[in-house]
Image (cartoon, helix red, strand yellow):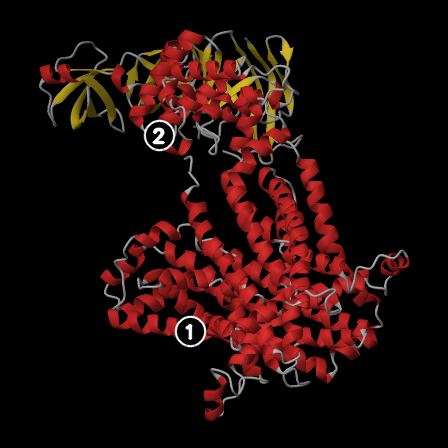
Amino acid sequence: MPPYKSNKRHILPGFGLSMGYTVFYLSAIVIVPLATIVIGAFKMDPQAFIATVTSPRVLASYRLSLSTAVFAALCNAFFGFLAAWTLVRYRFPGRRVLDALVDLPFALPTAVAGICFATLYSPVGWMGQYLEKTGIQIINAPSGIVVALIFIGFPFVVRTLQPVLVELEPEIEESAQSLGATRWQTFRRILLPHLFPALLTGVTLSFARAIGEYGSVIFIAGNLPFKTEIAPLMIMTKLDQFDYDGASSVAFVLLLISFSMLLVLNAVQRWQQKSYR
Amino acid sequence: MSIDIKNLTKRYPGYTALDDITLNVQKGELVALLGPSGCGKTTLLRIIAGLETADSGSVILEERDTTNLPAREKNVGFVFQHYALFRRLNVFENVAFGLRVRPSSSRPSKSEIRDRVEHLLKLVQMDWAIKRYPSQLSGGQRQRVALARALAVNPKVLLLDEPFSALDAKVRQELRRWLRKLHDDIHVTSIFVTHDQEEALELADRIVVINKGKIEQQGAPQEVYDHPANAFVYNFLGNVNVFHGRVKDGKVLVGDQLIEAGHASGLPEASDGQAFIRPHEIGVSRIRSGENDLAGIIREIRLMGGQIGLELETAAFDKPIEAEIPRDIWRNLQLSKGDEVFITLDRVKVFTGDYEI
Amino acid sequence: MQTNTTLQEQRKAPLKRNDPPAVQAILILLTLLFFAIFIFMPLGLVFAEGLRKGVAVYLEAIREPFALSAVKLTLITAAIVVPLNAVFGVTAAWAISKFSFKGKTLLVSLLDLPFAVSPVIAGLIFVLLLGTRTGFGSWLGDHGIKIIFSTPGIVIATLFVTFPFVARELIPLMEAQGREEEEAAITLGARGWQVFSRITLPNIRWGLMYGMILCMARSIGEFGAVSVVSGHIRGMTNTIPLHVEILYSEYNYTASFAVSTILVFLALVTIAIKSLMEKNVHNHQPTQH
């Protein structure tokens, strides 16, 4: 049957009203405000714009944001996969509680997460006092930023992998094993390729979130220029100095990165859907 | 309430769903729109109901042009393939819905609504389930409720879109007979869409065969079945043997065998065509009964419930003939695999020209 | 945020393809270790630090006027933001799921934009748009309307940040439910509002509630965007997360964690409702096929 589609008028009521309101509200809250930054960036003196975004301190903040986000996303690829696998395929006491708590990073305000990690890893904190002795520094270091970003991005990987893991047909594994494959071979050659698109989606989501993250990072990072100053904080710093153009310039580049991540994500998801068909 | 459909056309990007359809349905009639999936029959039904708009043409209900009337003003009962019961309302509320949404000036009183709903639920034998929710009912029960819901608003016409296709075979047959009986009682003008020829033949007063947006043939079930207007209809209504042949001397030549065929005398000499015969119209016997009988050998015997299916190989035809004979004849003849028999093909029909399904 | 459609029933079935017990034990232990470090320790820490100096100090911290005014402002913000975004979410989901039109895919991806924008930038754009620097902003200022560094700014920034939650929850749900029930209601003579209020709304109530809860959780907890637009006027434009930050930066750790316990408690309630509702949504969603 063809999709029911009318080229003359719509059968159900309210199309004009709902569509009109949707477009109006979307424009008022999202499109127009976002456009101001883009327009602002274009109105700016190009040389001043380039000077701002290529100044060593700003470049260092981009580099830091990107590298810690990548590192955290890779860690989450591992931990997220581990948690999704364990939660879906094994039965153990407390599993349901763990499963529910996967969402904690979504639900917990980032500022609270931030002060928690800063306190945990301070030299006298629950974790920090032991790490201090081994010489590993977390607080006021890029590794601390990574810790916060792992926390923030973790649910994305778990929640995208879980449904795919659940719907994995046992027949796939059974037939592989009946053909003589070992468990490890089955995992590496059959399961992993099958789960890979979802894993990639989750990792991309967690990466995209990590690039813009602010609240959970600033408490643990120490915010030392050139060392532990992330890009969103850079915007904040410029704003505090009433350097609006500078703040917009930094934000514009960060937006470009985020939106290209969105495009990548779209491509990944399309690929994911295709590979499950 | 009669329905007059005039020159209805509906195009989608890439194909034509309805191509200049003209159709008349008499008051109180039960009409089947029969055709393969994608032939446009559901689109036609939805246009009548106002759930779809036509590109051109008109729908006239009892001399009133309703083509551009919004669906809610058409007063047409529509029964959906997947029931479309309101899942958050119970059976009573579902049936009462159409009455309760009326403007207060024409809304019946609470007790009138209750009486009407109870009456309808009794009619569809669902009065025991009045407080249940759709999810607690079987498919057949849901469809009965959906029917009662459609009837509650006293529709001028009742439209049913593949009403039984989501049900399993036994329930489907039961519900089919019950619907026929119901229609005989209440006599509301009804159109139902189906792709199941058996359903159409058993249930309808009249069958309209549709293919690729066009009406191929319409008429009483027996008439359409016995006198298919063309190759498509012949093929669509039931099992059939098809042989490629050529018209010769008012007969049809299949392989090197000349076969008597109705209509063939009117066809141009030497034109290509197809010869059709239904399996149950083929005679099989141990002795030659006429000079046109073919000699054949039984290759396969299939038990098909009351009938016996035979696969017959002949020297004349390049593929086996499928025949069906009643079980007791098969027993009397004591046929078994490899036996030689005589085949009577006196009800062959020939159609020339293009033909595809 | 994903909903795990078939997780519920499948989880009950024992799996036959399990890994060797030793592998299972190791992986479960690793998972527990991860949860211990990243989930349980922060949770425990909040309560331990908040109660470090005793219940009296704890209660004092959450009852002092600045804390109370932060709670008040947070609740006001949520009370404005959640209904507005809920109405929008329902409207957008109706337009997107019940009709076919060109550009639908684009529209759906535009709805997700706020999720891709850093909270700091979300705040920045409203400072730029509504602050005294722009013509519009100074016009507002001239007429005595102060948006940035006051409550309206916080509300608008929060609107942006929580914009997609309800729509995102409802669109897949309503697309899965299809249009047939609404069509049936129309053929029975129902008018637009009747179709929506009697058929559609009851069908989506769980999803709507769930989306609103997510929206509320985020609007209570939003930090980055609100931090940019608030201007940090203590007692005037502080939300709970901002109050937590200020206390922390004043080295008043105990009070900071004490106030955080409110937010942790709300987060845990949100999670609990979410897992309860997931059960509900999936168990009471009778399929009609």
In which quarter of the view is residue C40 placed? bottom left
Residue B84 to residue C126: above or below: above
In which quarter of the view is residue C26 placed? bottom left
Residue C208 place in picture, x, y as percent: 55, 46
| Front residue (pair C87, B175) | C87
Residue B182 place in picture, x, y as percent: 39, 12
Give the residue displayed 37% in from the left and 63% down from the top.
Answer: A87
* Label 2 element class: loop
> Which residue bears the numbered disc 1?
C36
Can marks 1 and 2 be said to lie on one chain?
Answer: no
Residue B273 to residue C287: above or below: above
| Front residue (pair A124, C25) | A124
**Viewer can see residue B215:** yes
> Which subunit holds the residue at mark 1?
C
> Which residue bears the numbered disc 2?
B138
Q: Is residue A81 left or right of residue C82?
A: left
Residue A207 place in picture, x, y as percent: 56, 69
Crowding at dot 2, Cα within 10 Å, few <14 / some 14-19 / many 20+, comes out as: few
| Front residue (pair C253, C159) | C253
Q: Which amino acid type is marked by label 2?
A: Ser
